Image (spheres, rainbow, N blue to C red):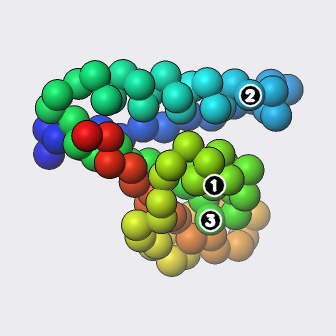
């Protein structure tokens, strides 16, 4: 598994929609591409997190899997998406 890296992030609502997420993802991807061991970066995201999914797709991630009903929030089940990007 050393050829993979999982990332996670969250941005306080006060700071969202200011390009911070894009900068963070780009920095992670730049670092990952400089690391000769890494080939795949992956993350997990709520299927309802449209802004996050849009950001990840914009930066090159694709959906590679879905775990139905993984999260429960306010009594509702939410799917978990796994998204990946090859960095080599």
Tags 3 and 1 touching, CB below 8 Å: yes
Disc 3 residue crowd, few under 14, some 14–19, many 20+, Cα 10 Å? some
Q: Residue at x 31, y 29 (%)?
A: 33
Viewer-proximal residue, 3 or 80? Answer: 3
Which is nearer the N-term, disc 2 or disc 1?
2
Answer left or right for 10 relative to 62: right
* Sequence-earlier tag: 3 or 1: 3
| Residue hosting label 1 | 53
- Disc 3 or disc 2, which is closer to the eye? 2
Picture coordinates of residue 64, whole percent (x, y): 40, 67
Image location of residue 21, percent across then percent down:
65, 31
Q: Give the total of numbered labels.
A: 3
The residue mark sitting in front, 3 or 1, is 1
Reading the image, the residue beneath label 2 is: 19
Instruction: State the residue in front, 74 or 47.
Output: 47
Residue that numbered label 3 is attached to: 47
Q: Name which residue lies at 75% across and 64% down.
A: 74
Where 74 falls versus 54 (above or below)? below
Residue, far bottom: 68
Distance of label 2 from label 1 (alpha carbons) = 14 Å
Of labels 3 and 2, earlier in sequence is 2
């Amino acid at each position: 598994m050393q050829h993979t890296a999982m990332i996670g992030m969250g941005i306080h609502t006060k700071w969202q929609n200011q390009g911070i997420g894009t900068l963070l993802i780009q920095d992670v991807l730049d670092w990952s591409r400089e690391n000769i061991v890494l080939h795949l970066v992956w993350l997990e995201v709520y299927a309802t997190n449209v802004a996050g999914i849009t950001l990840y797709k914009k930066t090159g991630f694709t959906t590679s899997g879905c775990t139905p009903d993984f999260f429960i929030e306010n009594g509702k089940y939410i799917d978990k998406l796994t998204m990946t990007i090859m960095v080599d």
